[in-house]
Amino acid sequence: MSNHDIFGLASETPMVSVKQMARQISPKVMAKLEYMNPACSHYYRVASAIVRDAEERKLIHPGMTLVDWTFGNSGIALAMAGVSRGYKLLLAAPDKISQEKQHMLRALGAELVITPSDALPGEERSCMNVAESLERSISNSFFTGMYKNPLSLKVHREATGSEIYRQTEGRVTHVFVPMVSGAMVFGIGAFLKAKNPKIQIIGVESQGSIYASLFRDGMPGDPALSELEELGSRQPSAFWDPSLLDDVVQVSDYDAFNCARELLRMEAVFGGGASGAAMAAALRAGASYGPDDCVVAVMNDFGGYYLSKMYRDEWMRKHGFYRKVKSALEQITAEDILHLKVRRDLIFAYPENTLAEVFEMMKQSDVSQLPIVSYNAPIGSISENKILSILIENDDAMNAKVVGFMERPFPVCRLDATISELSDKLQQSASGVLISLSDGRLQLLTKSDLIDALTHK
């Protein structure tokens, strides 16, 4: 029988391949889109489980007020789970949460109490203390404690972790998980480590969060403010288990926001800042991984909740985070163009070759120009036009060495050179551009190769 309860949907959240942004690194990179569900966050399954569990244990009943503190996403999920069952919602949240989240919570009927973001855990004015105080002062209320509820850990162990393993067909080698309460990273870690202890679990947090120091030194670091939402913590996790972690890395606000913006432009993945941080960490670490590795970055927040902040150029400039997103042309690199060509070893001449030998190479290889190489370094070039002009002046020159008639060498560019950079080189009187490969070999690109790439795209 069909299940028509919006919080009873059992479908998996998608996992997609990251192609453009990961093209310069060896491993396969995947994005686990945990925000693609009715509540647009990884709290979707958790909120429903907590409300249902409390109902089954007779701790709550319709008409009661559910109270908690939130960074926005957990509150939205809790409100969706609660209002559909007849509960009222009262939530405390720091003032840094986006206007979109605040509007969404109020649209759901939740009452919102805004607290100062700079208040530390334990201070009376912190959102945690305010929420607990509100619950004590309101009759017929229940504190859900989403960030410390053991059901959060259970949900991510049984659902999120198993999905990642199944969707990668067990090939996952590294998982990058945003850390807030820690329930998601430790739940995923518990499942995957049980399947394969070699799978690396890497927690991702904002700069100013306390987990990296806690993991490395056994002591929480000094907390500091960050503009990132849904990422980091100023107090240790109730689920803290370092045996399930292989590392904890920090990502700056600048890198997280810009990575998320590039994810949208280049991969059509509409994540928030925490998602951007997870992907930035995965791509940074992935540069040292091998082609047999499979990297998963968990996308835990929805970009639509940050249209007034990180997706607004004015806000990014005001806070010093703005970086121009690459245009479509700037995203095409020499490596991409080489992938479209029929690859073959570079045909080149040596300085001691005669013009006759060089011309025969051109005919045999059906090319109109050749680089001239000495000790694996390009020192010049020669073209059909040049050979023709030489013969018109001296028809005996065919037996002369090409070194005496060389033209300028082709410019050399790296694999990550953009098509705009390659075009600029070709406009500067060069008939070709040499691309330096990672193994030291060279490949030649011409104007026709660039045209093929543009028309192919």
Image (cartoon, grey):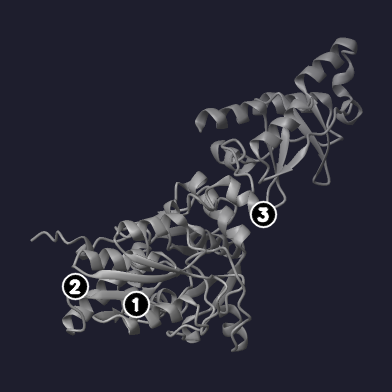
Give the alpha-carbon distance from disc 1 to disc 3, as whole Å.
35 Å
Q: Which image quarter: residue 250?
A: bottom right
User: Closer to us: mark 1 or mark 2?
Assistant: 2
Do callouts 1 and 2 mark residues in contact (Cβ within 8 Å)?
Answer: no
| Element on which disc 3 rests | loop
Residue ID for mark 3: 320
Rendered image quadrant of residue 131 = bottom left
Relative to 21, does residue 300 appear above or below in the rendering? below
Amino acid type at image mark 1: Ser
Residue placed most toward the observer, 105 or 378: 105
Q: Secondary structure at mark 2?
A: loop
Q: Earlier in the sequence, mark 2 or mark 3?
A: 2
In the rendered structure, which disc, 1 or 3, sits on the residue that comes first in sequence?
A: 1
x then y, percent, for residue 84:
20, 63
Q: Mark 1, residues whose alpha carbon is within 10 Å: few (<14), some, or many (≥20)?
A: many
Specify the quadrant of the image occupied by residue 40. Answer: bottom left
The vertical placement of 120 against 75, above or below, is: below
Residue tagged 1: 152
Judged left or right of residue 34, residue 431 is: right
The residues tagged by marks 1 and 2 sit, at their Cα atoms, a distance apart of 24 Å
Residue at image x 33%, y 71%?
Answer: 90
Residue labelled with disc 2: 63
Q: Nearer the viewer, mark 2 or mark 3?
A: 2
Percent coordinates x, y for residue 38 in the rendering: 29, 58
Q: Which quadrant: the N terminus?
A: bottom left
Residue 186's x, y, as percent? 42, 79
The residue shown at (83%, 46%) is 375
Kind of residue indicated by mark 2: Gly
Badge 2: few (under 14), some or many (20 or more) residues near its Cα, within 10 Å?
Answer: some
Q: Nearer the viewer, residue 62 or 196?
A: 62
